Amino acid sequence: MSNDTTNLLRELAFGYDRDLPFDAKIAQAGEGGGMTVARFEITSRYDDRVGGLLMQLTDAEGPRPLILVGHPGTLDKSSDYVLWPAEQWVARGAICATIDQAGHGERARRPVSMEDFQRWPMRRLDQTLQTVVDWMRTLDYLSERPEIDAERVGFVGFSMGGMRGAPFVGLDDRVKAASFCISGASTIAGRGGVAGELGDQLTDPGAYAPMMAGRAVQVVAGERDDLITPEATQRFYDQLSEPKELVWLPCGHWDFMPQGIKPVGPFLEQALNFGG
């Protein structure tokens, strides 16, 4: 398939009306430890309502960097898996935001399981395409807020959050730095045939790694990961351009936390210039 055809397919798959009203709602959801948490909701493509959490220091001044955090599969925006590391980055001076990805959290219409990702490849494709647009819409909305420095935007994705986040980062150059944790190139195929191959090309994180050229990218992986294998991680990393770094940890997929985020904070602070 030619580059022109691929670019056209991506434009169709990830396109949305840029002037679509957000119909935004935002309200304080919690406060403590010098931090505030606000719950926001915006309209995305196909009139999907996307809910998210925005975390920041209560008394911080001046525009601050924004870090978007993608949750793993089966979890959601309120999971400790994303809130715990986000609190640490907020304490260092960043603003963090996370959303329910398509099919998860408040947007789930049925229980979510790991088996879903293998059993229904077309549903997986639909949710991935929608989530990429949801992140773009979220960044559109948050970039308008005065406390956010739209020139210092980072992304951190855990597992599925990183797999779905790779097309977002590759396509949206507003993201200046990204850390992909226990994620890599695709390890599962579509339904087969031409349509399946096209679907894989549209969603394989490895296809978007070269599009991140010129931006700082970190990959943090488990040496014993049996879900996103070291081979898949290495394939993704090898397609990245400098500046990039690869951190191997002595863990698997399911025991990645808490040691997994230790290298992420320093990377973000250097790439987005915060934390002192």
Image (spheres, grey):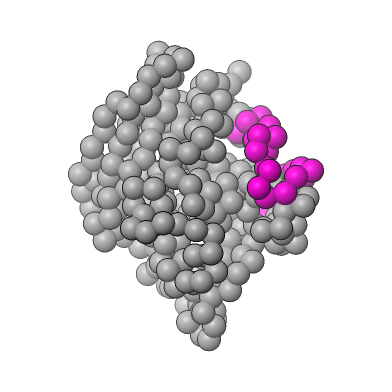
Give the quarter of the figure containing the N terminus: bottom right
For the question of whether residue 184 can be seen, the reply is yes
Residue 205 lies left or right of residue 249; in this view the side is: left
Instruction: Tell me where the magenta segment starts and ends, as one range.
Output: 239-268
Please tell me which residue lies in front, 74 or 122: 74
Quick check: 217 above or below 61?
Answer: below
Residue 18 lies left or right of residue 79; in this view the side is: left
For the question of whether residue 211 can be seen, the reply is no
Please tell me which residue lies in front, 256 or 139: 256
How far across and how far down the image is residue 111, in percent?
41, 56
How far across and how far down the image is residue 165, in percent?
51, 52
Give the residue at x 51% y 71%. 119
Give the residue at x 46% y 15%. 33
Count of labels shown?
0
Quick check: 110 above or below 105?
Answer: below
Q: Residue furthest bottom?
A: 193
Is 104 part of what is drawn in magenta? no
Give the residue at x 64% y 62%. 185
Quick check: 93 above or below 136?
Answer: above
Give the residue at x 21% y 48%. 21
Give the quarter of the figure containing the C terminus: top right
Is 253 part of what is drawn in magenta? yes
How far across and how far down the image is residue 153, in percent?
49, 38
Please tell me which residue lies in front, 20 or 112: 112
Residue 260 location, quadrant: top right
How far across and how far down the image is residue 265, in percent?
63, 31
